[in-house]
Image: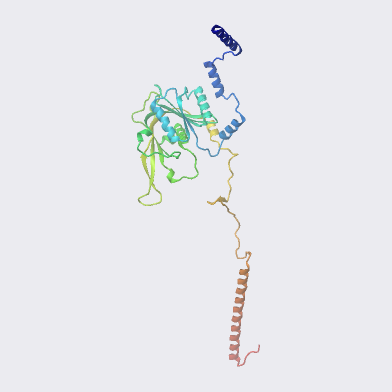
Amino acid sequence: FCLFTRKRLAHIQESKSSIYPLIMAPTEQQRKQAKLKQISGGKAPKARVSRYLKKHVEAQLVEGAKSALLLKGIKCSDSMNTVLKDLRAMKAPYAKLLSKNNNIVPFQDEGQQSLEFLTTKNDCSLFALASHNKKRPNNLCIGRTFDRKILDIAELGVMRYKSLADYAGNPKKRLGSKPMMLFVGDQWHLNADYKRLQNLLIDLHRGDPVQKIVLSGLDHIIVFTIAADPNAVNDGATTNKPLIHQRTYYCKLKKNPNGGKAPLPYLTPSGPDMDFILRRTEFATPDVWKLATKQPTVNKAKKKKNKTTNMFGETIGRLHLEKQNIEKMGGRKSKALRKAEAEEREEEKAAIDDELDREKEGMAAEFEQTYGFRQEE
């Protein structure tokens, strides 16, 4: 019986293998081809997805807060991992940190395609890639995208870093608060690369746009100071580059002891603090930059002249008329005003009649005194 059962099972397995052939796992070359096809957008998105992308990618007059994708490179040291975690804490809730390492070289075409795919998939327009190797130690690449394509990339070499954990007892910023940013140094407006880097840093830290600012919401300031290093920085990748010092302070507003309505800010170091240099850059060409900064004309609201809205939501209009003669202007008069005007006219008429009677009596008395008899009426 056992021998028969074994033969029967073997026959069933042979019949199954003939009906259902074995499916092999895809090779490494097939995986690369599928990934490249997915990155290049070979398959057209569905209607719902295309509507979503059209709504969120089209140009806007006022852009909302930009999310940042934080990821690790081929190799990432513990210190650079701390940089990404602190950057996520500063950018929260508009930041997403990926835990796995990625085989991405941002200044190569394949690496940029991978970054474009990941940023599009995670709906992020900013990215920061941390890596560490012998040639470029403690490397941080920050950048942004436009129309799901890489727009700007700046490679920073971190020379010194002091994390949020080093300021454990000091007060920290509130979640989602906007920073005040100060750029100190002539290179920020004299050098084209540093000017574009300044714009990129503002775009990275600016947060959600607001119409009005509450003083209590100003709780931290980030200061970027660019200065030449007297020790002539040489990290193996860049020589004689000026150091950029990033310092973060917690801002506490207190009453001015000398009087006045404006409060005085008291600054307390809160971290993170960083000293870095600018290594490689790949900024957008003038044509692409002009296209990226172009404002849409269709969505631009027309300016309404001589029309404002007050605090109660009421619309107030202003009319421009020629100079009017108010004295000759006749308006609607109420019954009470008409009665008052009639009584006033009667009083004026009675007063005039009394004055005429007095003048007439005076003239008659003067005539009688002169001629000795009264004048007949």
**Can residue 243 be seen in this snapshot?**
no
Q: Which residue lies furthest to the right in this view?
A: 377
Q: Could you say which is closer to the camera, residue 187 or residue 152?
A: 152
Whole-percent x, y for residue 38 in the image: 56, 23
Q: Could you say which is closer to the camera, residue 207 or residue 279?
A: 207
- Residue 269's place in the image compared with 3, above or below, is below
Residue 186 position by quadrant: top left
- Residue 265's place in the image compared with 235, above or below, is below
Residue drawn at x 42%, y 31% as measured from the top left:
85
Whole-percent x, y for residue 155 in the image: 44, 28
Give the mark count: 0
Q: Residue furthest bottom?
A: 372
- Residue 346's place in the image compared with 79, above or below, is below
Lateral position of residue 124 relative to residue 216, left or right:
right
Q: Which quarter of the image is occupied by the C terminus?
A: bottom right
Q: Which quarter of the image is occupied by the N terminus?
A: top right
Whole-percent x, y for residue 315 in the image: 57, 51
**Can residue 8 be seen in this snapshot?**
yes
Q: Residue furthest left?
A: 231
What colour scheme has been applied to the protein in the rendered image? rainbow
- Residue 25's place in the image compared with 231, above or below, is above
Q: Could you say which is closer to the camera, residue 188 or residue 344?
A: 344
Residue drawn at x 41%, y 42% as measured from the top left:
219
Residue drawn at x 59%, y 83% as measured from the top left:
358
Residue drawn at x 51%, y 22% as measured from the top left:
110
Whole-percent x, y for residue 20 in the image: 59, 14
Q: Which residue lies furthest to the top in this view?
A: 3
